[in-house]
Amino acid sequence: MLAFIGASVLLILGVWGFYRSGDPVVAPTLMLSGESLSLTNGEGAPTPNGVRVDALAPNGNAIVQAAIKPFDAALYRDLRWRVDGLGAGQELRLIWASKSDPRSIQARPLSGVVDGEGRIDLRTDPHWRGQIVALGLVVLGELHGPILVRGMDLRPRLLSFSALRDAFLADWTFFEGWTGRSPHFNRGAPLGTAFSPVVLVFLWVGLACVLYLAINPPWRFKPGILPYAAFFLIGWIVLDLHWQWDLSKRLDITKETYAGLSDAGKQAAGSDSSFYPYLMELRRRLPEQPARLVLVSADPFGYAAMRTRYHLAPHNVFAGLKGLPEQSQLNPGDYVLLMYPLPRIRYDATRHRLIEGNRALPVELIDGRSSLGALFRVGKED
């Protein structure tokens, strides 16, 4: 019992101390400067000291983006930036995007610049949360001279005991939902977590064994394997209970989504719901006998393309192209399915041609009513 309790206490104190130390393995200071900065909007050039902005883009701003790896916003609240040359009438903003909504760009005005440097606490910003996947600075206002963006620093915050408790509970109750690996894999914790449940249990078992050995040294007591096996078994049971909890959550999702539905209804309610009805409409427009169909997609080996092949079986669907195939690769009567968006390919209704650059493919439009894609039948070359 002493080894059990002692291992638990030591593990809690050790993890808390590890986080409190600001160890670079957990949350290193992100120093974004030099090669990690690039000008993505506006005119300028990289310099040894940062990025120089010479002119704004036609939309009235300049954007300097930092090359970052995704990080947890909860670990970083203290932002410091270094920008030279800002004058009256000019504004500097911090912009970022999170993994949960990468298309929504958040912005926060930055002020209080002293000698080209400033600092802000992001703790009170409601949008600074989750995994941050993009980060940058925006310069607004008329430029009277070049501006030099020297860099940004994001410093980790020190976790209190209560904050560590909340983070631990959030990691331990992390639920990923259904993924392609769900039947045989359980991540157990968010990406980037320093101490996943498996690591914590491994550390606890190790500490318990060491403490038991220290309390009951082999030269004083007859050694036995049973206590060590018990520690291992306890760890195994804890991980298995976590696994069973995860499975029960997935079962609840499955019941809510699919219970009482037909096969077609299950497909329409599942992860393919955004395009399954469209594919069923295409099936009605394809011949009953299996036909040869070429699928053109911006992501030919992505989820949507692979599921399209599945739902259109037994038609012979080839899904490996990002652009139009050569005329010699097709026969009259074959089909071409375009999955939008494909900005380089357009349909000329007057000439009945699919056009990509200098390539033109004679086709007949079969279905072009959906915003998801269009189906064509290959014709003969005039």
Image: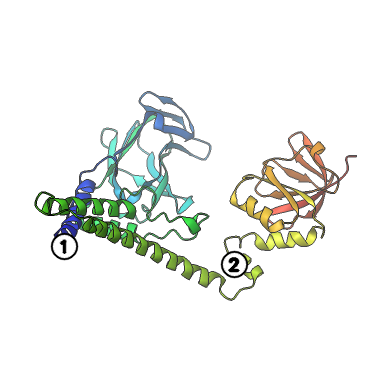
Q: Which of the numbered marks, if any, corresponds to residue 320?
A: none
Going by the numbered disc 2, the residue's amino acid type is Ala
Residue 214 location (% of width, % of height): 13, 50
Q: Which residue is mark 2?
A: 269
Q: Measuring 29% from the left and 52% from the top, which residue is drawn there? A: 202
Which residue is under mark 1?
A: 1
| Left or right, residue 18 beside residue 214 | right
- 148 over 236 or under it: above or below: above
Front label number (1 vs 2): 1
The x, y position of residue 130, in whole percent, is 38, 53
In which quarter of the view is residue 150 placed? top left
Q: Could you tell me residue 331's position as x and y percent?
A: 84, 43
Q: Residue at x 36, y 62 (%)?
A: 240
Q: Is residue 170 visible?
A: yes
Disc 1/disc 2 C-alpha distance (Å): 51 Å
User: Camera-side residue: 201 or 177?
Assistant: 201
Q: Quadrant of the N terminus?
A: bottom left
Badge 1, how many Cα within 10 Å: few under 14, some, many 20+? Answer: few
- The kind of residue on which mark 1 rests is Met
